[in-house]
Image: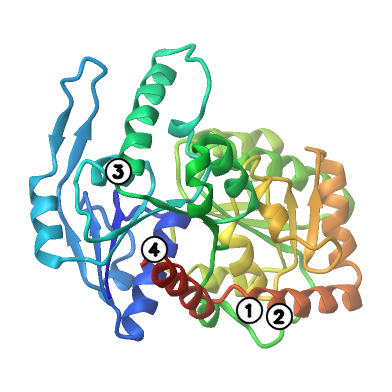
Amino acid sequence: MRVLQILPNLRKGGAERLVLDICIALKKINIETVLVTFSDINEYPDLTKQINWKQIKSTFIPSISGKSNANIAELEAFICEFKPTIIHSHLWEAEIVSRQISYPKAKWFSHFHDNMPQLQKGFPFSKKQLTNVYERRLMLRKYKNCKNNFICIGNDTYNYAKYVLPKHSFKKISILNNAIDYSRFVIAKKEISKELNLINVGSLVNKKNQKFLLDVMVHLKKQIGHVHLSVLGSGPNRGFLKNTLETLHLERDVVFHGNVDKVEDYLWKSTIYVHSATYEPFGLVLLEAMAAGLPVVTLDGRGNRDIIEQGKNGYMIFEEDAELFASKILEIWQNKKRYNIMSQYAINYAKQYDIKQYVIKLLSLYRFKL
C-alpha cells in the first residue's frame, strides 16, 4: 500500500496536526506515505522532519464561464510516478485541485474536517454563494467519476455530509473520530494548583470567540480576586482582544502567547481548559487538554458534543452566559476531590482517541474500500 496525503499548506491548525500525526504513525508501521502540500508554508518544522514531505505548487481557479485555470501538471506527474493506492485529501483547496486529476488506479478519500461550505445546498444570494454552487456541481461530478469515499470526524460532520452529498454516496461515508498523539500530552496524575490557571488554544478568529472568555474572566476576578488565562494561537482578532484587555482591566491576568511549538508544556502548567468556540467540528485540543489532566469547560460547538461527558470530563454550556460559565469553572476548582476525579477521568477518556488506534481504523477503511 502506498498512501498519498494532500493538504494546501502546513499552517497551524487541527486538520494539519492530524494529517502530520497520521503520516508519522503510518511511517512507524512501514506504510509508504508521502504528504504533498501546495505551499512551502510550514509551521511544524519538527514534525515534518519525521515524514516524507513534498511541496508541489498546484492551483485550480474555477470559472463559471468555463475558462478555468489549472496548474496541476507537476502534481499529476508525481502521482503517476508514485503510483499511490490511496489518495487522501484534506481541506477544500486540496479537494478541488486534486480532483482535476484522473487516476483510477487509486482509491480516493475526502476528509470532512468541518462542514465544508462549498458543498452547501441552496439558492445563491451572493457572488460567493454562486461560486460555491458552481464548485459543488463540479465536485459532485468529480466525486462520482472517481468513486470517492468520505471520512467524517464526528456526528456533526457526518450528518452534514449526508445532507449535502447525493444518496448514491451514502454507503461511502464513514465516521472516524479525530485522534491525538496521546503519549505526547499524557500526564500520570494532575495535581490541582492553589492558583486558578486557565488555558485556551485556538486561532484568534471570530468563531473561536475568545472575547467571551474575557467576560468570563471579569466574573471570576470579582469572585476570587486572582485568576490567570493563557491564550495560545494567532489571528486577525489579536489587536481587538488586546485592546479589550485594557478596557476590562485584565492586562495582568491574560497573556496572548501566539503560536507555540510545545502546547503540552502550557497545558501541564494549567488547571482547567476553557473553550469558547461557537462552532467546533470535533475539537482535537479538548482531547489534548484532557490527556494533560485538565477538566474542560466549553460552549456548545456542536461537534464537541461527541467529546464532553457532563460532570465527568468537563461541562458544556449551551448558552453564552459568562456568569454560568464562570460558576462551572469554580465548581470544579473549589472542590479538590471533584477536581481529582474529573482530571483522572479525562486522562483515561482521552486514551481512546490515541493516534495508534486511529491508524488501525483508518487502514481498515482503506483496505475495506480497496
Decide: is 126 above or below 185: above
Decide: is 341 above or below 273: below
Q: Identify the image quadrant of the N terminus.
A: bottom left
The quarter of the picture where residue 345 lies is bottom right
Q: Which residue type does callout 2 highlight?
A: Asn
Separation of disc 1 and disc 2 at Cα? 5 Å
Instruction: Report crowding for label 4: few under 14, some 14 to 19, many 20 or more residues within 10 A (C-alpha).
Output: some
- Residue 192 visible in image: no
- Residue 143 visible in image: yes
Q: Earlier in the sequence, mark 2 or mark 3?
A: 3
Query: Nearer the viewer's eye, disc 3 or disc 1?
Result: 3
Q: Which residue is mark 2?
A: 348
The figure's colour scheme reads: rainbow
Q: Which residue type does callout 4 highlight?
A: Val
- The residue sitting at 81% across, 38% down in the picture is 319
Instruction: Report crowding for label 2: few under 14, some 14 to 19, many 20 or more residues within 10 A (C-alpha).
Output: some
Secondary structure category for the residue under label 1: helix
Q: Which mark is residue 351?
A: 1
Q: Are marks 4 and 2 in contact (CB under 8 Å)?
A: no
Q: Is residue 364 left or right of residue 210?
A: left
Image location of residue 130, percent across then percent down: 40, 17
The quarter of the picture where residue 215 lies is top right
- The residue sitting at 53% across, 47% down in the picture is 170
Q: Are marks 1 and 2 in contact (CB under 8 Å)?
A: yes
Q: Which residue is mark 4?
A: 19
- The residue sitting at 82% across, 79% down in the picture is 340
Q: Which residue type does callout 1 highlight?
A: Lys
Q: Earlier in the sequence, mark 3 or mark 1?
A: 3
